[in-house]
Image (cartoon, grey):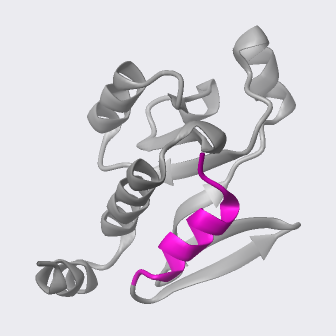
């Protein structure tokens, strides 16, 4: 089970990442472009999801494209979900208390790579073993 401390630790370990808060809701950015954020459900989300609406902590994360999003939704619907607000948009919602730490790290790094400037992403990838 992952926590906000895990999100913070993983995100801030990535190059040129900062944490910002808007109305007490944290978001992580690379070069002023958000890549993961806390995403409380709004009334419209809860109405759309009905009984399926989760009540635990929710992380929003950018993904490469809608195809990746659909694959995550199909692969693990107990962890990943979406709302009509995100229809057609390359972002996924994550039940933070249901994702394993290793999977969370992979998701956050991928979100960072999607949003980081190409030069910075290449430099980061070149440092990996």
Looking at the picture, tell me which residue is in the foreground, 16 or 90: 16
- Does residue 7 show up magenta in the picture? yes
Looking at the picture, tell me which residue is in the foreground, 85 or 56: 56
Magenta span of residues: 1-14
Relative to 125, 113 lies left or right = right
Residue 118: horizontal and vertical position, in percent? Answer: 22, 78
Residue at 82% from the left image edge and 35% from the top image edge: 42
Quick one: quadrant of the C terminus? bottom left
Residue 62 vertical placement versus 17 (above, below)? above
Residue at 66% from the left image edge and 56% from the top image edge: 3
Most prominent secondary structure in the magenta stretch? helix
Which residue extends farthest top? 51
- Does residue 10 show up magenta in the picture? yes
Q: Quadrant of residue 46?
A: top right
Can residue 53 be seen here? yes
Relative to 8, 46 lies left or right = right
Quick one: quadrant of the N terminus? top right
Residue at 54% from the left image edge and 60% from the top image edge: 36
Residue 86: horizontal and vertical position, in percent? Answer: 55, 35
Relative to 95, 88 lies left or right = left
Residue 107: horizontal and vertical position, in percent? Answer: 40, 53
Q: Quadrant of residue 56?
A: top right
Residue 98 vertical placement versus 122 (above, below)? above
Residue 108 vertical placement versus 86 (above, below)? below
């Amino acid at each position: 089970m992952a926590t906000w401390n895990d999100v913070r630790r993983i995100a801030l370990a990535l190059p040129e990442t900062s944490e910002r808060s808007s109305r007490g809701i944290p978001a992580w950015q690379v070069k002023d472009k958000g890549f993961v954020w806390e995403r409380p459900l709004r009334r419209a989300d809860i109405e759309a999801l009905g009984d399926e609406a989760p009540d635990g902590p929710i992380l929003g994360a950018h993904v490469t494209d809608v195809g990746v999003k659909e694959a995550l939704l199909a692969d693990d619907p107990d962890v990943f979900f979406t709302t009509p607000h995100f229809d057609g948009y390359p972002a996924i919602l994550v039940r933070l208390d249901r994702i394993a730490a290793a999977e969370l790290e992979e998701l956050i790094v991928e979100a960072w790579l999607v949003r980081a400037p190409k030069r910075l992403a290449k430099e980061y990838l070149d440092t990996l073993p």
